[in-house]
Image (cartoon, helix red, strand yellow):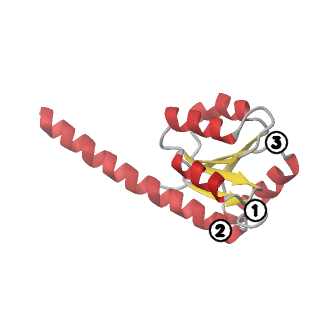
């Protein structure tokens, strides 16, 4: 399983451009940028592999978008972004289903981004393997 499609959701257009450049230096991804949480939700049906989601958005909070995405598309990886160093935000993000949490300008270096992408790919691979086994067991149960 490889990572192909990435959403960046942040109301800071400058930061969005910087993050896109860093991701493009890592690999050949299809990257879509959204500047509001609701734009992201409108396109979530295309099921990106990873969503980099800002904690503070102009139209809503990243937590609200995270909860909506995870309830509808549980296999989509969401990496929360924040400029705040408060540990409770990171913990709340992870408890709400985020795959990881990045502090802007501190953790968003290319090495860390590459590690996150590799981790997401590995999680997806294991998840697909487990789901395949479950389907085979269910199939053998009925037939």
In front of the other: label 3 or label 1?
A: 3
Q: Pick out the residue farthest to the bottom.
A: 111
Residue at image point 61% right, 34% down: 44
The CA distance from mark 2 to mark 1 is: 11 Å
For marks 2 and 3 on the same chain, the one whose residue lies earlier in the sequence:
3
In this rendered view, identify the residue nearer to me: 71 or 26: 71
Residue at x-position 81% and y-position 42%: 11
Question: Is 64 positioned to the left or the right of 32 in the image?
Answer: left
Which residue appears at 19% of the width and 37% of the height?
Answer: 139
The C terminus lies in quadrant = top left
Question: Tag 1, which secondary structure?
Answer: helix
Badge 3 marks a residue whose secondary structure is: loop
To which residue does mark 3 refer? 11
Label 1 belongs to which residue? Answer: 22
User: Mark 2 highlights which residue?
Assistant: 112
Q: Can residue 87 be seen from the camera position used here?
A: yes
């Amino acid at each position: 399983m490889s990572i192909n499609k990435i959403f960046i959701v942040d109301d800071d257009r400058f930061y969005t451009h910087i993050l896109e450049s860093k991701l493009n230096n890592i690999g050949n991804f299809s990257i879509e940028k959204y500047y509001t949480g609701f734009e992201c939700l409108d396109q979530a049906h295309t099921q990106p592999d990873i969503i980099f989601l800002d904690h503070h958005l102009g139209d809503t909070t990243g937590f609200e978008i995270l909860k909506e995405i995870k309830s509808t598309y549980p296999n989509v990886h969401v990496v929360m972004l924040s400029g705040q160093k408060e540990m409770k935000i990171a913990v709340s993000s992870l408890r709400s289903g985020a795959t990881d949490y990045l502090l802007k300008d501190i953790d968003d270096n290319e090495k860390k981004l590459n590690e996150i992408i590799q981790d997401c790919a590995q999680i997806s691979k294991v998840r697909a393997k487990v789901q395949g086994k479950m389907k085979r067991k269910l199939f053998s149960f009925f037939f």
